[in-house]
Amino acid sequence: MNNFGMQEALKTLGVNRANEGTSTGSKWYKTKGDKLESYSPADGKLIGTVQATDEKAYHVVIKQAAAAFEEWRLWPAPKRGEVVRQIGVALRKYKEPLGKLVSYEMGKSYQEGLGEVQEMIDICDFAVGLSRQLNGLTMHSERPNHRMYEQYHPLGIVGIISAFNFPVAVWSWNTMLAWVCGDVCVWKPSEKTPLCSIACQNIINKVFEKNDVPEGVSCIINGDAVIGQLMAADERVPLVSATGSVRMGKAVGRTVGERLGRALLELGGNNAIIISEHANLDIAIRGALFGAVGTAGQRCTTTRRLIIHESVYEEVKERLKKAYSQLSIGNPLDANNHVGPLIDKLAVKAYSAALRKVKEEGGEILVKGGVLSGKGYESGCYVKPAIAEVKNEYEIVQHETFAPILYIMKYKTIEEAIALQNGVKQGLSSAIMTNHMQEMEKFLSHAGSDCGIANVNIGTSGAEIGGAFGGEKETGGGRESGSDAWKVYMRRQTNTINYGSTLPLAQGIKFDI
């Protein structure tokens, strides 16, 4: 049987059959936590185990991270950037095996796995430049012989809770920025993809050892929600960046908020593409297809809804049905396949339940779904991408199902389309397909899309590194990656300097003695 070079990839990455799951860098700790078993959704086979972090080990990690911060924050930012540059070089070296592990452990196609590692490389490049641009600003004072300026200082320990669907990229978005900002990081990866964290730590360690980076700058703690909540409640962790479900985000946000810490939340999406009567349908179909079935519908930016103008509705529907019939479903490591498996059987149950709910609410299944079985589908995690004709107000349409189910609906006016697009609790990504300038400008205006990402003539998925990534409403409001997202990883300070020989007060107040 073709294993697509997986065993070689695991060996190259230093991932063993049994792995410790707690590390402060070069040190790995034996713990009494539960054993996490990582089964590949591609073939249902056990890849390896990871020993979860227990509470005692957690505190050891946090203590070491706090000690590392005391030294790391004093390194000049460009010097920290040089370390990140070398990490980018190392990731280029390990791109193929790491991309393969992402694909095998999570289930996305090998090309998407490579693309995810490329995101890591790209954020390294971005962070290197950023290390010389952590700029504040100067301001004019209202008082004579005074000046004011604003500067940014390292924040401290950044806790990172990542999700299974992007098991390495989301971590890198946070860490590379946090590291050049002078912070240290404690990463709790998804319990569904723990081996990716082991591989990343091994790659990082080689670079850190070469540069004498303090022990504790890069830490990992593996485990379930219990260890995540422990970190969320920890006052020693000023920022917790959490990516995952709305339910998880609310729990983390509540816990962090109770101690007045900072929470960067990247939660659910219920993303829509508006297909106008003025759209280039070739582009629209292509964008909708990848957006809906890429990563088997398990991206937070996955296209969930198509809002189609009534004049092109039937044509789009027929072209989509034809495109779906040509999809190849199978092992994600096989380049001939378009769609891989869902992450596990729980996800399959949610997919099946969603399709039943569509029928119960009165929707029509246009492209029939179903769970695949037989040769090549032994894991029980492979499903058929489905299309359903629905109304936006259906309960199931309002809910994000992490699976390849595409909901389609009609509209008459652009105002109606925007109202439908905005008529969900989530606000991550959105798009309009149109060549009509007034339509696209309306969509991008104050009265347009209420999402953090609004695209024109491209789909909802595939955000670039240079832009800040995140959304509004139940998506959480956080921003990661590009633009000025780095500011959340630092503390802002305003400074006023009196270079005169008197002490004038603000607002012209007199206080003479």
Image (tube, helix red, strand yellow):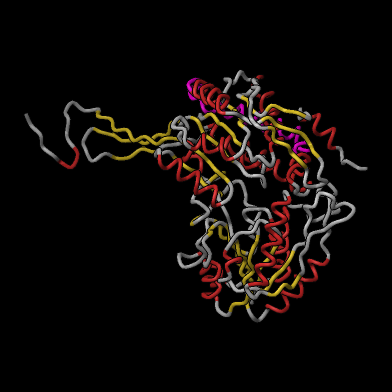
Of residues 136 and 183, which is closer to you in this image? 183
Q: Left or right: where does residue 156 sit relative to residue 332?
A: left
Q: Is 446 colored magenta in this rendering?
A: no
In the image, taking residue 99 as reference, residue 160 lies left or right, namely left
Q: Residue at x 51, y 61 (%)?
A: 425
Which residue sits at x=86%, y=37%? 5
Residue 217 screen position, x and y as percent: 57, 26
Q: Quadrant of residue 296?
A: bottom right
Q: Residue furthest left?
A: 513
Q: Position of residue 368 (x, y in %)?
A: 77, 69
Q: Is residue 103 visible?
A: yes
Q: Nearer the viewer, residue 187 or 229?
A: 229
The x and y percentages for residue 286 are: 73, 64
Does residue 95 belong to the magenta stretch? yes
Evaluate whether residue 79 shows in this view. Answer: no
Residue 276: which quarter of the image? bottom right
Find residue 246 and report its horizontal and vertical position in percent.
Answer: 54, 52
On screen, 210 above or below 309? above
- Report the label total: 0
Q: Specify start and end residues of the magenta stretch as a single range.
A: 70-98
From the viewer's perspective, is 217 left or right of 167? left
The quadrant of the image that shows the C terminus is top left
Q: Is residue 287 above or below residue 57?
A: below
Dividing the image into 4 quarters, which one contains the N terminus? top right
Q: Main secondary structure of the magenta part?
A: helix
